[in-house]
DNA sequence: GGCATATAGTTGTTTATGCAACTATTCAAA
DNA sequence: TTTGAATAGTTGCATAAACAACTATATGCC
């Protein structure tokens, strides 16, 4: 075993793999158990559109921190599911705005309930002020690197 | 805007998307800039093998928190890169042990240095004891959900 | 108005992920 | 010894991610 250690290997694993992956899988499982066929990635797009409908694709890239091709394909699949529609912008012909369908609006309450349930499951035994520290640190990490 | 809010939506986004994604991308970029062609997912396998060589695939699943098909394919690609080899276990014919090649050993120092550099970039301005809180909370989240 | 640069979105490509299903092997109980 | 259940790893399939390259459109400067 050489002298050179990955000094923060445990922190890296924890940040990068364990908690995020565990939450994602649990949430996807909760969706599936509830009979929902959308993926959590698709849901994250809907979530932002519930907060503010008819965003441009570029804006969705910004808000979900994905790159453009990924957003294009996610929206392709959401269109197939008839949960969003693309509407060409009148102000700028390069831009599509992405708008919720009525069907997507019907999903909002139940899926947000499931997401809350998932976070409740995740945060059992976690102190409220510790949560604030986590938010602060992870936000700082994101700001450092984005 | 309905009454039902995703109470911890910000926390979820932070945990699930922002910090983990930002670190992953930065690290991959640092690898690329250094002329390394391995992905960070492949690297995470190597990392565990540097710590303990010749693990079973199942053990790698446990340690990296991925499922079996994902590990199978990651190892397929690492074999193609001649960084690992599968060796059938003598004790149990279901098991492959996954062992480092000499070439993989040569990568250890430089890549761990890059990973440390990446974490340094990520953690600028973060207090040491805050890091301990993050580790504790994310470990708790993982333990709650795994 | 023309040109160079920037930007929105798409396509190509490769890698990765996880659920479902499967095969071969191992283990435990009768 | 036989049988059923459990386990390790693989294959099929669909979704997702991101880099590179591209096309069409917009912007700013001369």
Image (spheres, coloured by chain):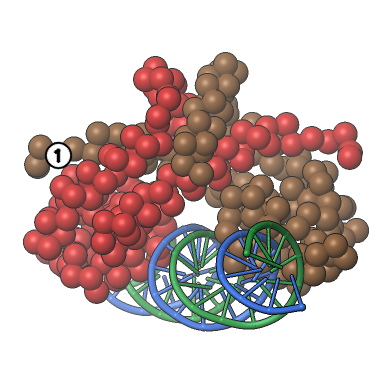
Chain colours: A red, B brown, C green, D blue
Rendered image quadrant of residue D25: bottom left
Looking at the picture, tell me which residue is in the foreground, B1 or B145. B145
Give the image location of residue A82, x and y in percent: 18, 70
The residue positioned 68% from the left and 37% from the top of the image is A9
Q: Which residue in the structure is indicated by mark 1? A: B4
| Crowdedness near tag 1: few (<14), some (14–19) or many (≥20) residues, C-alpha within 10 Å | few
Q: In this view, does A33 lie above or below D3?
A: above
Residue B27 place in picture, x, y as percent:
62, 46
Residue beneath the point at 87% across and 53% down: B106
Height in image: D10 above or below A42?
A: below
Q: Nearer the viewer, residue B43 or B4?
A: B4
The answer to whether D15 appears left or right of B95 in the picture is left
Is A83 displayed left or right of D4 in the figure?
Answer: left
Residue name at image x 80 percent, y 64 percent = B92
Examine the image and state in which quarter residue B83 appears.
bottom right
Residue B145 position in % (x across, y down): 46, 41
Q: Can residue B20 be seen in this view?
A: no
**Image check: B49 left or right of A26?**
right
Quarter of the picture containing the N terminus of chain A is top right
Of residues A66 and A20, the one nearer the viewer is A20
Which chain contains the residue that carries disc 1? B
SS under mark 1: loop
Residue A86: in sight, yes or no?
A: yes
Q: Residue at x 65, y 35 (%)?
A: A10
Give the tally of numbered discs.
1
**Relative to residue B18, is residue A99 depicted above or below?**
below
């Amino acid at each position: 075993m050489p002298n050179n250690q990955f000094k923060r290997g445990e922190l890296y694993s924890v940040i990068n793999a364990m908690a995020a992956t565990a939450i994602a899988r649990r949430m996807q499982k909760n969706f599936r158990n509830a009979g929902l066929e959308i993926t959590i990635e698709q849901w994250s797009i809907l979530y932002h559109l519930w907060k503010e409908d008819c965003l441009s694709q570029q804006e969705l890239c910004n808000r979900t921190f994905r790159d453009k091709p990924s957003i294009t394909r996610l929206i392709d699949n959401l269109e197939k599911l008839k949960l969003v529609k693309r509407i060409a912008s009148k102000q700028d012909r390069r831009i599509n705005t992405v708008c919720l369908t009525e069907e997507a609006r019907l999903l909002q309450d139940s899926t947000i309930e499931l997401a809350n349930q998932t976070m409740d499951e995740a945060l059992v035994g976690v102190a409220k002020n510790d949560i604030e520290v986590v938010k602060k640190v992870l936000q700082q990490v994101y700001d450092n690197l984005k």
